[in-house]
Image (tube, rainbow, N blue to C red):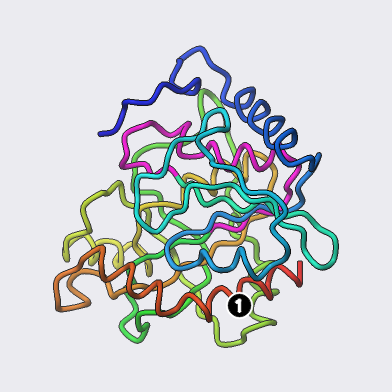
Amino acid sequence: MLKTQTNPLDAPEADPFDVARTAAAEIAAATGVPRHDIALTLGSGWGKAADLIGETTHTIPAHEITGFSAPALEGHVGTLRSVLTPDGKRALVIGARTHYYEGHGVRRVVHSVRTAAATGATTMILTNGAGGIKEYWTPGTPVLISDHINLTADSPLEGATFIDLTDLYSTRLRDLARSIDASLDEGVYCQFRGPHYETPAEVQMAKTIGGHIVGMSTALEAIAARQAGMEILGLSLITNLAAGIQKSPLSHGEVIEAGKNAEAAISALLAKIVAAL
């Protein structure tokens, strides 16, 4: 567990939304951009999309912004970028995802999403690299997230906060994505706690309860985005078949390699989706 950094979100009395508003104000001051329209969290394999969606006008080391942590995982760049799209919109590109398994607590996991909402973003695009359960998915396949199963036994919602998660992953945005690439399949994402990969039995459990994709991010962030009133699009890059579906051992190196091999194609796809928003 990594708990060496001090962070205002770690104080029990802190209001995480106040911290997010502070972070958003710092982003506005650092970029000179008072409002962003779209936010994207770019997971493993998706990073090049930031170069394709428009002109990056400002790049900020995320750990310099209140509430953010330095990245703990290879494949995440640890920056926040303000991008001007060709149609004049502003996109906040988040390359600084905090994973649940890092042990910082859920507030830090969803801080980037809450900050994005505080900057004004009304659309949240969440991407990840994940394991696939459908046997015909090959490494490098992009898949739309249609729904999720949260297997972390945790939530970003605190107290008696009741949020409807019907159509959490926007049907409208999924239809828009398929209008750009009609071959896009979709599936239900299962977020496990990690950091270990799932066992073959756990993968079969996920399949039995309706899952098609297994990973260690995204679901908690999506819940926080819905609480903030954002419209959400989720995309997984299938980096490998899940344990027991794939017969060879799993490795993080395999995930990184699959992401690099698919990066050009999936980043171009994501850029086209952003242009159509």
| Residue at the disc numbered 1 | 268
At label 1, which amino acid type do we have? Ala
Residue, x 57% and y 49% (percent of image)?
165
Please state which of residues 225 and 266 is positioned toward the viewer in this rendering.
Answer: 266
Residue, x 77% and y 63% (percent of image)?
85
The percent position of residue 21, horizontal first and vertical second, equals: 68, 28
Magenta stretch holds residue 70? no
For the view shown, which residue lies furthest in the top direction? 13
The percent position of residue 102, horizontal first and vertical second, equals: 32, 39
Magenta stretch holds residue 119? yes
Image position of 201 with respect to 71: above or below: below
For the view shown, which residue lies furthest in the right direction? 88
Residue, x 59% and y 47% (percent of image)?
80
In the picture, measured across the screen, residue 234 lies left or right of residue 87, that is: left
- The answer to which image quadrant residue 133 occupies is bottom left
The percent position of residue 1, horizontal first and vertical second, equals: 25, 34
Q: Of helix, strand and loop, which one carries label 1? A: helix
- The tally of labels here is 1
Please state which of residues 55 and 8 is positioned toward the viewer in this rendering.
Answer: 55
Q: Residues within 10 Å of mark 1 (few under 14, many from 20)?
A: some
Residue 172 visible from this viewpoint: no
The percent position of residue 75, horizontal first and vertical second, equals: 39, 59
Question: Magenta stretch?
Answer: 98-126
In the picture, measured across the screen, residue 230 lies left or right of residue 240, that is: right
Residue 227 visible from this viewpoint: yes
Residue, x 48% and y 47% (percent of image)?
78
